[in-house]
Image (cartoon, rainbow, N blue to C red):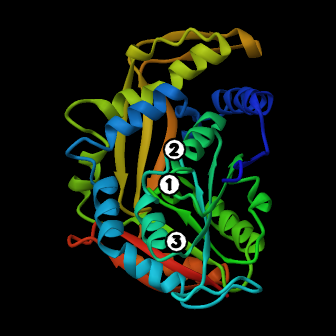
């Protein structure tokens, strides 16, 4: 079994520099804002995992149901044509899979299993900003897929898509969990353009997306009764306290989630419950908050299927398949590179 290849596109110094820039820029903006990605240190990742198990949080549950039900069909679609110069399997074309924002690679596992059963899994590459998560996934999966090449990419998929592995098989880039909805409109357009530039005709893109539905159902997912979403949202302040020596009092910030029906977007904020003066000594910044002042901490866009497919086509992807859960709450799109 070959040793997994690890491509490191950024290190702790890069992450620290990005954190410092984003904290200074965001907390001196009007309104104040902090990007969603700052939530995901080890504590934040654990909180998000707990959030996905809350009864109100339907996206993970719905996406898993779709993938469990349709993994074999997805594998069949991916294997219908031979890759350029690749080896031929009696069952079809071998596939190299790259998962963006892989984390523990739980979401993609059922698709990997379906490809592996048919002898069609050529390689798997988790792509994540956290090097420890990438290494853990590679160590865990090595015994499960002994005939597949395993490698990992440590990087930011909004910057480092040019480092996607090149080989002689059709590639599937998977972007699951609804993370695509955390981008603004311009960010989504740029991401799709960058991804298309990194791929070749014949490659595939699999996208998990949350759909427009009853606002009460949507908002309940971001206001769970156990308060896990609220603690996850406040975790960004813990990150700044830990990494930048800040003295935020997270317990004095209220979690706020609102639905903008015109923009089809959940907006997440933290609202100050009292006047505060916060010091961030690592970046030489002092920030004042009035009672009721908010920090914008993220968005989650919900999509109408036809609109999302139009966005894919505009970036030269050809949407060919779409699977939804029985309630139509979530969908997985499979698009071919044009």
Q: Position of residue 13 (x, y in %)?
A: 80, 27
Disc 3 to disc 2, C-alpha distance: 23 Å
Crowdedness near tag 1: few (<14), some (14–19) or many (≥20) residues, C-alpha within 10 Å: some
Disc 3 to disc 1, C-alpha distance: 12 Å
Q: Residue drawn 44% across and 16% down?
A: 250
Residue 310 appears left or right of 260: right
Q: Which mark is residue 206?
A: 3
Q: Position of residue 99 (x, y in %)?
A: 58, 58
Crowdedness near tag 2: few (<14), some (14–19) or many (≥20) residues, C-alpha within 10 Å: few
- Report if the CB atoms under discs 3 and 1 are less than 8 Å apart: no
User: The C terminus lies in which quarter of the figure?
Assistant: bottom right
Q: Is residue 293 visible?
A: no
Residue 114 appears left or right of 200: left
Crowdedness near tag 3: few (<14), some (14–19) or many (≥20) residues, C-alpha within 10 Å: many
Residue designated by label 2: 140
Residue 14 appears left or right of 109: right
Residue designated by label 1: 179
Q: Is residue 29 visible?
A: yes
Disc 2 to disc 1, C-alpha distance: 24 Å
Q: Position of residue 107 (x, y in %)?
A: 43, 56
Q: Earlier in the sequence, mark 3 or mark 2?
A: 2
Element type at mark 3: strand
């Amino acid at each position: 079994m070959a040793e997994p290849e690890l491509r490191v596109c950024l290190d702790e110094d890069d992450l620290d520099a990005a954190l410092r820039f984003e904290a200074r820029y965001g907390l001196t903006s009007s309104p104040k804002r902090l990007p969603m990605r700052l939530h995901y240190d080890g504590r934040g990742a654990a909180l998000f995992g707990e959030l996905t198990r809350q009864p109100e949080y339907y996206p993970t549950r719905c996406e898993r149901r779709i993938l469990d039900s349709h993994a074999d069909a997805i594998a069949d679609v991916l294997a219908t044509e031979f890759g350029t110069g690749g080896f031929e399997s009696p069952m079809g074309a071998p596939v190299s899979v790259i998962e963006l924002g892989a984390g523990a690679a739980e979401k993609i596992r059922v698709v990997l299993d379906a490809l592996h059963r048919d002898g069609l899994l050529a390689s798997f590459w988790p792509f994540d900003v956290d090097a420890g998560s990438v290494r853990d996934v590679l160590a865990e999966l090595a015994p499960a897929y002994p005939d597949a090449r395993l490698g990992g990419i440590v990087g930011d998929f909004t910057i480092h898509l040019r480092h996607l592995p090149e080989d002689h098989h059709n590639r599937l880039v998977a972007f699951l969990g609804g993370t695509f909805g955390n981008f603004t409109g311009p960010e989504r357009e740029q991401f799709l353009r960058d991804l298309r530039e990194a791929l070749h005709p014949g490659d595939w893109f699999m996208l998990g997306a949350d759909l427009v539905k009853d606002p009460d159902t949507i908002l309940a997912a971001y206001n769970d009764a156990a308060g896990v979403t609220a603690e996850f949202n406040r975790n960004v302040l813990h990150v700044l306290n830990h990494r930048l020596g800040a003295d935020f009092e997270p317990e004095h910030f209220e979690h706020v989630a609102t639905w903008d029906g015109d923009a089809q977007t959940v907006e997440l904020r933290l609202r100050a419950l009292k006047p505060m003066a916060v010091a961030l000594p690592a970046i030489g910044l002092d920030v004042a908050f009035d009672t009721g002042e908010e920090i914008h901490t993220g968005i989650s866009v919900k999509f109408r299927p036809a609109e999302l497919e139009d966005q894919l086509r505009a970036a030269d992807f050809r949407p060919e398949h779409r699977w939804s859960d029985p309630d139509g709450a979530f969908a997985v799109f499979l698009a071919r590179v044009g």
